[in-house]
Amino acid sequence: MRKIKHLIHMSLDGYAAAADGNFEWMAYNNEIEKYAHDVIHDTTEAVIWGRNTFEGMRMYWPTVPGNPGSSPAEVNHANWLNQSNKYVVSTTLKEADLGWEKTMLLGKNFAEEIAMLKQQPGKDIVMMGSLTLARALRQHDLIDEIY
């Protein structure tokens, strides 16, 4: 059975995002980047996001490979994302809104759908950020590890 790994940047007192959703408070450096990539690139092959996190990711990561200012680590991560299956939990988005190859929409029955994804063969699945979704998945006991 595959695991759901939740990768979240959080302070010791539980702070994970500013009130407006920005992440400018977060420390991020080469060491943290390497850790995050080590956790997910070798052991996972799919990602789950809530709508808000997905929309931010979709706007940024597909642009990285063609951006000459992107670091090798960013390009590596962008390529990993592009090759991975991406699952988006939303009741407001439509399939036509996704606009990123290998992206699938999960709706009202997302907990059942994610439980079924965990039963499929393959590497683990990572969930990045997505605090509202994380709360819901914890209520259904679907998160196996938190990083």
Image: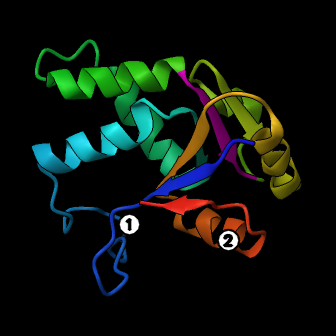
Q: Which of 110 and 31 is in front in this view?
A: 31
| Number of callouts | 2
- Counting from the top left corner in percent of width and height, residue 75 is at 26, 21
**Does residue 125 appear to the left or right of 114 in the view shown?**
left
Residue positioned 53% across, 44% down in the render: 54
Q: Is residue 50 visible?
A: no
- Counting from the top left corner in percent of width and height, residue 137 is at 70, 65
**Residue 127 sits above or below residue 136 on the image:** above
Residue positioned 62% across, 51% down in the render: 4
Main SS type for the magenta part?
strand
Q: Residue furthest bottom?
A: 13
Q: Nearer the viewer, residue 55 or 70?
A: 70
Q: Which of 13 and 42 is in front in this view?
A: 42
Q: Which of 146 and 49 is in front in this view?
A: 146
**Residue 135 sits above or below residue 1 on the image:** below
- Counting from the top left corner in percent of width and height, residue 49 is at 58, 48
Residue topped by disc 2: 138
Residue topped by disc 1: 21
Query: Separation of disc 1 and disc 2 at Cα?
Result: 21 Å
Location of residue 22 by image quarter: bottom left
Residue positioned 14% across, 25% down in the render: 71
- Counting from the top left corner in percent of width and height, residue 60 is at 35, 34
Residue positioned 61% across, 31% down in the render: 123
